[in-house]
Image (spheres, rainbow, N blue to C red):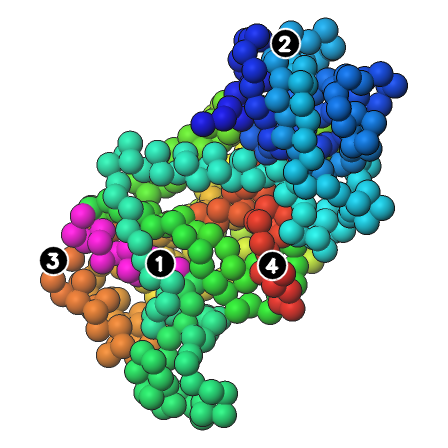
Amino acid sequence: MKLRIKELLQSNPTEQQIEVQGWVKTCRDSGNLCFVEITDGSCLTGLQVVAEANLVNYESEIRRLSTGCAVQVYGKLTSSPAKGQTVELQAESLRIIGPVDPENYPLQKKRQSFEYLRSISHLRPRTNAFGAIARIRSELNFAIHRFFREQGFIQVHTPIITTSDCEGAGEMFTVTALPADKIQGVESFYQDFFGRRAGLTVSGQLQAEIFALSHSRVYTFGPTFRAENSNTSRHLAEFWMLEPEMAFCDLACDMELAETLVKDLVGTILAHCADELELFERFVSKGLLKKLETVQAQPFARMTYTEAIAALEQSGKRFDFPVQWGTDLQSEHERFLCEELADRPLIVTDYPKSIKPFYMRSNDDGKTVAAMDILVPGIGELIGGSQREERLDLLTGRMEEAGLNLKEYDWYVDLRRFGSVPHAGFGLGFERLVQFVTGMSNIRDVIPFPRTPGSAPC
């Protein structure tokens, strides 16, 4: 297997001939020499190739190289006298595999706005910023699986197509094989592919609970979907969710796992993506490194929802959305609490029952539930979780209040009839995590192929 550029930059110079393939970032012609920087996406830094005038295609091709050209280079890796690099490749042959017309190539050497790059999502991975985001996503993905394996969890693949609306908000995408003119109300779906109405999942939580109550510690990690017609920098129609579930676990152990996870993932990125973080620190979010180091340095702050409302009311700050007990916290409230009040990640607990889903465990006060959100600077809510209601009578009461058809959720109620135990879990929005560690402000820029109202490119 050929070495990638990341490995070459970390290796010692050798007199052996090596082969490198990649894309041209820059080409500087100094007359008798061309300095060609190429990348293969394995790291932020490119490899400098030195092409001399004695190469057979020097005049006809090499001097005309432009950004984006795909090339194959044979040569020797040598020490580099240039500042900022330890090695360079002395080319013995350089072949153009895929040429580029520089007049029509959308990506130029100058910096281009993220908004413009969204319009060419098929090419934006070739830029420094989006290449860095792809590597950070990959590192985080690997770290998630490593973390849960070390914690004794098993992964469960929950379905993408489901007949259960976990959040009960009616924002599921309907999946149907029926022609549009054959859909005349809910009864029509009895003739559909699954014999009932089905949709794309908004959460794998309910199915994960099934396995938590047989395997104790499980997690699911995959795409979820929400048909929310919201065209903001915070929302996507398709996004990835990490959802662990634990049996014999209450809210306290749920919070402990969530905090430990966030610290671990942030530590992994600090340790393994230093070059990428430096890029975002310089060009995207000043103070990013300090923010991430703060996550590692001290425990997360904690307060109840009631304490949070009181703090917001007493802050003297004017908010666009009114603050009152019984309403959900908005992003501006969440960011004030963690950025200005706590100055670090904050866990808010015990939310009003009226604004939370049916599966959350009722507290003894009858007004709140054993729920928690982790709020982080720059984002607001990163994680939302709860202890699940394990008591049969209280669960069915909440489901009836929510207007759910108990017959359709009979399987879920069975989990409380047969061997029910206290259990808890949470959901972490993967794209929000990537936003947090990169400082990117728009969630559409941290997922490879954003799906939003009116837009589904590629």
Judged by depth in the image, the label closer to the viewer, 3 or 4, is 4
**From what the image shows, is residue 295 above or below residue 215?**
above
Give the residue number, with chain letter if any, for mark 2: 78
| Neighbour tally class for label 2: few under 14, some 14-19, many 20 plus, Cα within 10 Å | some
Give the residue number, with chain letter if any, for mark 3: 419
- Decide which of 215, 275 is in the foreground and name it: 275
Distance, label 4 to label 2, CA atoms, is: 41 Å
Based on the picture, tell me whether residue 196 belongs to the magenta stretch: no
Nearest to N terminus: mark 2 or mark 1: 2
- What count of labels does the image hold? 4
Give the residue number, with chain letter if any, for mark 4: 458
Give the prevailing secondary structure in the magenta stretch: helix
Q: In which quarter of the image is the C terminus?
A: bottom right
Distance, label 3 to label 4, CA atoms, is: 47 Å
Distance, label 2 to label 1, CA atoms, is: 52 Å
Which segment is the magenta one?
Answer: 203-215
Distance, label 1 to label 3, CA atoms, is: 21 Å
**From what the image shows, is residue 298 above or below residue 220?**
above
